[in-house]
C-alpha cells in the first residue's frame, strides 16, 4: 500500500501466483515420493509400486574407478606375448611406444629389443642394449649373461669369460648355463684344462646333451678319440632318443673302423628321424665304401629331396657313378658339386681323378692344380698331378711332384710304386730299385698295422716291376683272398666345418706296357662332419689313391 499524490492510500493487488507471501499447497497426487518410499504407478485406476531395475541400483552402489597409473612395466606382458610368438614387427612397435613413454627407462623393453636385434644378426647393437639394461638394473644376473653371450658371438672370448665370472659371483646357487658357456669360451681360447673343469662341473649340476656334446668335442680336439666316444655313449644313456648324439657317435665309429657299431647307431638315428640327412649320407657312404653303389644311390635319392643343394651329396653321387664306370654322369655331378662349393679341395681332386681316368690330362691338370693350391699338404694330390704331367710330357715337373708327394705322404705304398715306374721309364734304374724297396717296406708295415692286403693289380704291377729290376718279388704275393682298396687304415679326424673323406678312388695301370692308366678302383666319399672342429686339420683318408703309371 502506498500514499498517492491526493493524500490517500492506494492498494495494489497482485495475482496470487506473484504474491511472495502466498503459501501454495500442492495436491497429494502430484508430490514426488521421498527417497525412503517406493515409487508408484497408476494404470487403469490401480496404483502399483514401481521398482527400479537392478542395473540402476548397482550403478548407484558402484564405486568410482581409480585413475590408470602410467607405470613403465604396464605393457611388458604384451611385449612378451608377441616375442614368444615371433611376431617381431608388432613387438618392435610396442617397444618403440613403450620407450617413448618412459624415455628409454623400461628395462624389459630394452631387453627384448636386444634379443630381437641379436636374432637379426646385429650383435653389437644388442650388446649395447644389454649394457643399458645392466645400468638400469645392475643386480640382474640375466642382463650380465646376455652381455656375455653377445661378447661370445662377437668373438671377444676373454671379455665373455669375465662377464660370466661376474654373473657367477652374483648367483645364489650354481648355474648350469654359466658353467657350460664358460667351458665353451675356454675351449675357443684353447685353455682345454679350464674348459674341461667347467664342463664337468656343469654336468654335475645338470645332465644336458649340449654339455655332453661339447665335452666330447673337447676330447676330440685333444686327440683323445676314445674319451670322446665314451662321452657320447654316456650321453646316450641319458638321452637314448637323441638323433644327433647317435649320428655323431656313428660317424666316430666309422672313423675308427668299427663299421658294425656305426651302422647300429646310424640305424637308430633313422628309426627316430627317417629324414635325418646326416645319417642318410653317412649310411650311404658306408655302403658305397663296400662297393654297394645301387643301395647307396637309393639312400642319396632320399637325401636329395631334403638337401638338393648339398655339395657333399652330389660328390658322393658322382663317385657312385664313377664306381659304375659312368664317367660322364660322374663329371656332371662333380661339376654341380664344384659350383656349390668351389673351394672344396676334395671335389676338385675327384674331378681331376675322373678326367685322368678318361685320359683328359689337360683338364685333370687344371683341377688338380686348383686342389693343390687349396690343400698343399696333401701328398696324393701331388701324385695325381705328377701322373698328369707325365702324360703331358713334362717329366721335370712330374719328378718334382713325385718328390713332394713322397715328403708329404710317408705311409702309402702306391706313391713309391708310381714313382718307381716313372723312374724306370726314365732309365733311372738305381733310383727305381731304391723306391721299389721302399714300396716293399711300406707293404710290410701296412699288413702289420691293418691285417689286410692291397689291391691285386697294385701287387701285380709291383711284382712285374721287381722282376724287371731283378728284385725278389715274393712280398708282392697276396696273403689272403681279401682285397683291400685302402693304402692305410687310421682314425679320421673330421675336417673343420666341412666333409670327411672316407674312401678315395683307386686307379691302377695295366700289367703290360700301355699308354694310359686304367681304372680299377672306386670312390672318394664326402660324409657329414662329426663334432670335431679342429681348424686347419685335414683328415687322413682311410682309403688312399692307388694309381700306377704304365710300365
Image (cartoon, rainbow, N blue to C red):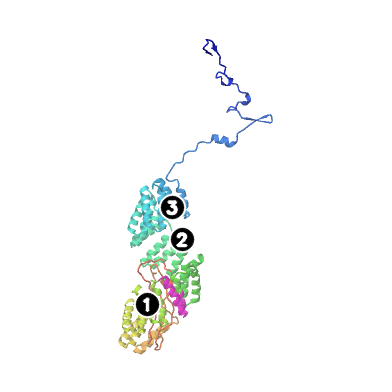
Mark 2 element type:
helix
Q: Do the residues labelled 3 and 2 touch (CB within 8 Å)?
A: no
> Is residue 502 depicted above or below 157 in this figure?
below
In magenta stretch: residue 319: yes
Residue at x 50% of width, y 36% of height: 64
Dot 3 crowding, Cα within 10 Å, few <14, some 14–19, many 20+: some
Numbered tag placed on residue 92 in the rendering: 3
Numbered tag placed on residue 164 in the rendering: none
Of the residues under marks 2 and 1, which one precedes in the sequence? Answer: 2
> Is residue 294 depicted above or below 475 in this figure?
above
Of the residues under marks 3 and 1, which one precedes in the sequence? Answer: 3
Dot 1 crowding, Cα within 10 Å, few <14, some 14–19, many 20+: many
* Cα gap from disc 3 to disc 2, whole angstroms: 40 Å
Check the picture and name the quadrant holding the C terminus: bottom left
- In percent of width and height, residue 260 lies at 47, 72
For disc 1, the marked residue is 368
User: Which residue is outermost to the top?
Assistant: 7
Check the picture and name the quadrant holding the N terminus: top right
- In percent of width and height, residue 216 lies at 40, 64
In magenta stretch: residue 432: no
Residue at x 59% of width, y 36% of height: 54
Mark 3 element type:
helix
In front of the other: 283 or 518: 518
- In percent of width and height, residue 378 lies at 35, 75
Marks 2 and 1: which is nearer the front? Answer: 1
**Magenta span of residues:** 317-341
Of the residues under marks 3 and 2, which one precedes in the sequence? Answer: 3
For disc 2, the marked residue is 238
- In percent of width and height, residue 245 lies at 45, 64
Left/right of residue 156 with respect to residue 30 in the rendered view: left
Amino acid at each position: 500500500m502506498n500514499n498517492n499524490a491526493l493524500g490517500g492510500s492506494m492498494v495494489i493487488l497482485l495475482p496470487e501466483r506473484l504474491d511472495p507471501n502466498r503459501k501454495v499447497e500442492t495436491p497429494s497426487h502430484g508430490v514426488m515420493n521421498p527417497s525412503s518410499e517406493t515409487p508408484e504407478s497408476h494404470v487403469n485406476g490401480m496404483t502399483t509400486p514401481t521398482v527400479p531395475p537392478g542395473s540402476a541400483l548397482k550403478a548407484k552402489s558402484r564405486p568410482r574407478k581409480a585413475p590408470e597409473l602410467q607405470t613403465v612395466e604396464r605393457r611388458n606382458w604384451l611385449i612378451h606375448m608377441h616375442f614368444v610368438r615371433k611376431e617381431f614387427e608388432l613387438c618392435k612397435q610396442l617397444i618403440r611406444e613403450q620407450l617413448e613413454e618412459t624415455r628409454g627407462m623400461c628395462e624389459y623393453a630394452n631387453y627384448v629389443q636386444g634379443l630381437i636385434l641379436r636374432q637379426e644378426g646385429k650383435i653389437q647393437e644388442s650388446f649395447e642394449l644389454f649394457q643399458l639394461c645392466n645400468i638400469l638394473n645392475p643386480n640382474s644376473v640375466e642382463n650380465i649373461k646376455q652381455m656375455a653371450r653377445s661378447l661370445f658371438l662377437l668373438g671377444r672370448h676373454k671379455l665373455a669369460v669375465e662377464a660370466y665370472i661376474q654373473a657367477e659371483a652374483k648367483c645364489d646357487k650354481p648355474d648350469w648355463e654359466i658353467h657350460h658357456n664358460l667351458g665353451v669360451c675356454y675351449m675357443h681360447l684353447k685353455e682345454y684344462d679350464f674348459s674341461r673343469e667347467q664342463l664337468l662341473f656343469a654336468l654335475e649340476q645338470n645332465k644336458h646333451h649340449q654339455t655332453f656334446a661339447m665335452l666330447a668335442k673337447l676330447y676330440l680336439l685333444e686327440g683323445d678319440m676314445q674319451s670322446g666316444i665314451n662321452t657320447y655313449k654316456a650321453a646316450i644313456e641319458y638321452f637314448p632318443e637323441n638323433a644327433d648324439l647317435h649320428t655323431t657317435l656313428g660317424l666316430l665309429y666309422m672313423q675308427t673302423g668299427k663299421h658294425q657299431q656305426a651302422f647300429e647307431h646310424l640305424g637308430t638315428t633313422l628309426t627316430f628321424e627317417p629324414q635325418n640327412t646326416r645319417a642318410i649320407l653317412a649310411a650311404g657312404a658306408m655302403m658305397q665304401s663296400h662297393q654297394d653303389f645301387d643301395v647307396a644311390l637309393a639312400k642319396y635319392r632320399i637325401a636329395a629331396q631334403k638337401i638338393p643343394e648339398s655339395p657333399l651329396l652330389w660328390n658322393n653321387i658322382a663317385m657312385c657313378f664313377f664306381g659304375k664306370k659312368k664317367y660322364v654322369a660322374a663329371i656332371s655331378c662333380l661339376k654341380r658339386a664344384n659350383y656349390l662349393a668351389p673351394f672344396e679341395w676334395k671335389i676338385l681332386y675327384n674331378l681331376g681323378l675322373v678326367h685322368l681316368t678318361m685320359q683328359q690330362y689337360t683338364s685333370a691338370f687344371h683341377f688338380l692344380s686348383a686342389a693343390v693350391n687349396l690343400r698343399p699338404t696333401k701328398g696324393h694330390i701331388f701324385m695325381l698331378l705328377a701322373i698328369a704331367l707325365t702324360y703331358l710330357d713334362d717329366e721335370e715337373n712330374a719328378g718334382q711332384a713325385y718328390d713332394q708327394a713322397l715328403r708329404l705322404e710317408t705311409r702309402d705304398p702306391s706313391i713309391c710304386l708310381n714313382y718307381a715306374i716313372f723312374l724306370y721309364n726314365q732309365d733311372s734304374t738305381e733310383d727305381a730299385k731304391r723306391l721299389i724297396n721302399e714300396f716293399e717296406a711300406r707293404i710290410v708295415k701296412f699288413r702289420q698295422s691293418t691285417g689286410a692286403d692291397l689291391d691285386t693289380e697294385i701287387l701285380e704291377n709291383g711284382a712285374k716291376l721287381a722282376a724287371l729290376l731283378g728284385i725278389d718279388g715274393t712280398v708282392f704275393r697276396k696273403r689272403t683272398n681279401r682285397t683291400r682298396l685302402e693304402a692305410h687304415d687310421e682314425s679320421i679326424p673330421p675336417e673343420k666345418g666341412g666333409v670327411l673323406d672316407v674312401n678315395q678312388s683307386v686307379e691302377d695301370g695295366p700289367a703290360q706296357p700301355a699308354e694310359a692308366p686304367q681304372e680299377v678302383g672306386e670312390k672318394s666319399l664326402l660324409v657329414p662332419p662329426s663334432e670335431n672342429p679342429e681348424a686347419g686339420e685335414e683328415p687322413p683318408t682311410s682309403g688312399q689313391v692307388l694309381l700306377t703309371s704304365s710300365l
